[in-house]
Image (cartoon, grey):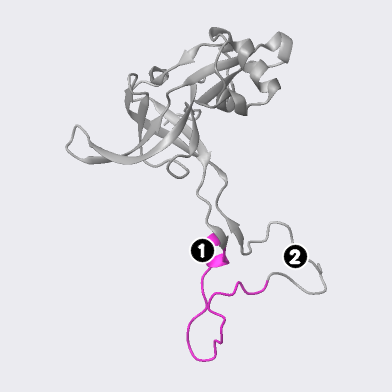
Amino acid sequence: MSQKANRSALLGRKLGMSQVWDENGYFVPVTLLDVSTNVVTMVKDGEKDGYTAIQLGYGQIDPTKVTKPLAGHFAKAGVTPRRHLVEVRTENAADYTPGQELTAEQFDEGVQVDVTGTSKGKGFAGTIKRWGFKSYRRTHGSHKNERRPGSVGACATPSRILKGKHMAGRMGHDTSTALNLTVVSSDVESGIIAVKGAVPGPKGGIVLIRSAVKGA
C-alpha cells in the first residue's frame, strides 16, 4: 500500500484514557479522541497542484481572531473558521468537496489507524533519562560521577564532538506516530473514537488520525 493511497484522515483532540471490556472478559485500555467539527477546507488535484491531497480544518475559533487571508480561505470553502489545519495526501481526493463535513464514520470499528501527535515535553534531561545511559557504580572512589555521561569524544582527532552524539538536552515535545492502533468504537453522534492503547501527547493535545499505512 502506498503512503498516500486512499487514506482516510481526521483531526482530533485527545480526551484521555479509559478502559472497556472485550469479548473475552478482559479490560482493554483505550484512548478517547474527539473528532467532531472536521471539515474539508481545500481539495488539491494532480493537474493544477502536481499532487492530490485534501486540507482538513478542525476546532472552532472566533472569526475576529483569524487573519484576513485565512478568513478569505475559509469563506471560499464555505465554512466557518477553524483553529487547526492539516494537509493529507490521498489518491481519492476527487471524492471530497470543499465544505464537506467529516465524521467518526470515516473509521469503522475494528480498522487499524496511525495516530500522530506531539509527545509530552519533559524539559532538560540528562543522558540517563533521555538516552538510557548506565550510571556509574556508587562505591568508594567514585566521586560525583554517578550520572555523568563520560567521554564524549577524542581530543586531537577529530578535535570536535561528532554530530548526533547522545548528550543531555531537551527531551520530548517531538512529533511521534503510534502505528496500527485498532479502533474499538466509533460514535458518530458524540464524535468520539476510541482506539486501543496509548497515543502521543497530553490530554487536550491535537492528533491526526489516518488509515494505517503498514497494516498489521
Q: Is residue 6 visible?
A: no
Q: Which residue is mark 1?
A: 129
Q: Earlier in the sequence, mark 2 or mark 1?
A: 1
Q: Which residue is mark 2?
A: 161
Figure quadrant of residue 164? bottom right
Circle 1: element type: helix
> Residue 55: in sight, yes or no?
yes
The answer to if 132 sits in the magenta stretch is yes
Q: Is residue 56 left or right of residue 108?
A: right
- The residue type indicated by label 2 comes to Ile
Prevalent SS, magenta region: loop
- Please state, as top left, top right, bottom left or bottom right, where the C terminus lies in the image: top left
Q: Nearer the viewer, mark 2 or mark 1?
A: 1
Residue segment shown in magenta: 125-151
User: Does 18 appear in magenta?
Assistant: no
Q: Is residue 18 above or below residue 114?
A: below
Mark 2, secondary structure of its residue: loop
